[in-house]
Image: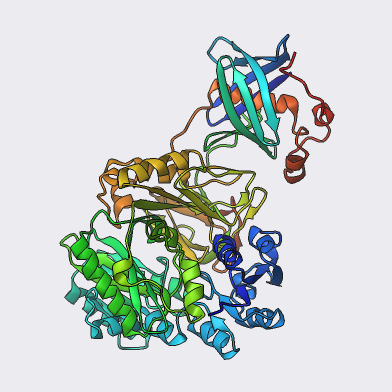
Amino acid sequence: MSLFRKILVANRGEIAVRILRACQELGIATVAVYSEADAGALHTSLADEAVCIGPPPPLQSYLRADALLTVARERGCDAVHPGYGFLAESADFAAAVTAAGLTFIGPPASAMRAMGGKIASRRVMEAAGVPVVPGYHPVATDPEAQTVELIAAAERLGYPVLIKASAGGGGKGMRIVADPERLTLELESARREAQNAFGDPTVYLEKLIPGPRHIEFQILADHNGHVIHLGERECSIQRRHQKIIEETPSPALTPELRARMGAAAVAAARAVGYTNAGTVEFLLAPDGRFYFLEMNTRLQVEHPITEAVTGIDLVKAQIRIAAGQPLPWRQEAITWRGHAIEARIYAEDPAHQFLPAIGRVLLLSAPVGPGIRVDTGIMAGDVIGLYYDPMIAKLICWAEDRDEAVRKLDWALSHFLIAGVTTNIPYLQAIVRHPAYRQGRLSTDFVTRHLAAWQPPTVEPSDEVLVAAAVADFQGEGVAPAIGAILPGAEPYSPWSVADGFRLGRG
Amino acid sequence: MEFRYAWGNGEATVRVQPAAEGLWVTIERPGREPVGYRVMVSRREGERLLLSIGERHLLFHVARDGKARLVAQGAHVFRLEPPTPRGARPPAAGGDLTAVMPGKVLDVLVQPGQRVESGTPLVILEAMKMELRITAPGDGEVAAVFVRAGDVVNPGQKLVELR
């Protein structure tokens, strides 16, 4: 069965790069799209064609379904890959792609609708016999009446409770409330954040499960009703509900528990008629009980760790499933080898409340070696702006066992050079070096429990660093025209700029 | 040639002189005798600088960011600035609360003259679609409010003054 002729990659950054490369390996032509802020970005240079779709704000570019469909039609595409984020979980976009006669590389719009609202998806899972966290969804539509309902519900569930946005994701609109007196205030704030982020202020309550692990299962489902799971990813290391370090296998799962949770994940996918790649998220309580959290109807950021231990290329699997091919693997044939960990490197400042850092990446040098994978859409000279997610790269390390994988990640972080913007690399190092992390004692409150007071260490420059600084200044920047062209601070007037026959150190 | 660098709470003066073989580099730090190193530039390709300093062979990445000299060793980036004249350093922020990043003011929760305690929310900013609550760092009174809901603020812009 033939795959596609030409795929539109409706995304940017590292995930666009990841998808474009998979298409190239499969011999499929590609079209990239970009906003004015991304002119010259890595993903535009990898595609066969690249089309500008508007100004930097996502609402005027990457979120414009009409513009994307026009490009797909004009350039003769027969399929659209949405990546993650932006329109990846928009059922309307998936339906529009299909209505235009193209293939949406993802689940059907109906499955996305069933799983899209967190409240609706909880009901579907309860009906399918998948355990869900005890919670309460307001019946009233008026915010003040909802608040009255939710205050009563919180009393019944027992504090602490968790406020969640129905349309939510990424921790936006989410609040933990331990003090009944703060509930009204936090409900208002969560509604406002949910409205701004998702255009839908609906929030609901869940009982807070203390000290849980976040365990999610990767599933694949073809159009013949064949559904398998590729095992779990533990994503318990989070900061403000944003995943920062993920690993597989989870140190907490026994083969027996893995089989039970995997079966629940497959049941969840079947309940909504799911096809393509998806992820079923669970909370695993310290007592061993697990609860359905939500289903992500798309490729996940952390998909590479599953690829590392199963050997299955998930993006290619998505494309093959979308083209109508049956899954070539039975559940019994899925085996896992070794241990993989991903760390997300963000342009953010751990010394100042982790605020996004903006600026030009002046130096970028990623570690390489056996078992090290770096997924990035950034090149030296690129500007990290405020319009998009501040993730610079994903660093994925694989080794035969967890201890070796942790050490490899620590080494690789120590050799991941990014200058020009502040990054969370020192924070990631502090996590992987923490005894509790080494011992696999993970929970979603890991960073607040163990690293609340953490501050980046101040390192004094050694004499060697000062020598290097002075030698660089002594030589000027002119030795390398390439860097001089990028860096605003180059010194074209320095006599050393033209000293191309520089012979210091050779007598 | 002489170069002066400052960082955090430290500073140093570094002299570079061509020597019979390579360079002679002297480092002076306050309160320490100058230390000299024999340095050979093994290689310089763009941002990469391979030096032998004494017996050690070391790889650095170097760049400029405005007036600052960046030197990276492994993943660690050192930012060395030209020293500012003594006394010219800006004083600590004092009673002003400033925006640390570009964003939009969603709400201002206090008025001039209002007493606040440590942790009282003063202003709610939105940036990257996340809400950021600016809280009082200590007990005091609001002396002035410089922003209104809906304002777009830039890093360093004053939001609220406490006394």
Quadrant of residue A59 in the image? bottom right
Residue at the (62%, 47%) spot, across then down: A361
Whether residue A351 can be seen here: no
- Residue A288 versus residue A266 in the image, above or below: above
Quarter of the picture containing the N terminus of chain B is top right
Whether residue B115 can be seen here: yes
Quadrant of residue A183 in the image? bottom left
- Residue A59 versus residue B96 in the image, above or below: below
Residue at the (46%, 63%) spot, across then down: A301
Q: How is the image coloured?
A: rainbow
Where is residue B43 drawn, in percent x and y?
68, 27
B60 sits left or right of A477 in the view: left
Where is residue A3 drawn, in percent x and y?
56, 77
Taking depth in this image into account, of A247 and B134 the one nearest to the observer is A247
Furthest residue in direction bottom, as rendered = A99
Furthest residue in direction front, as rendered = A1
- Residue B33 versus residue A477 in the image, above or below: above
In this rendering, the count of numbered labels is 0
B125 sits left or right of A378 in the view: left
Where is residue A155 drawn, in percent x and y?
19, 74
Taking depth in this image into account, of A215 and B144 the one nearest to the observer is A215
Where is residue A389 drawn, in percent x and y?
53, 61
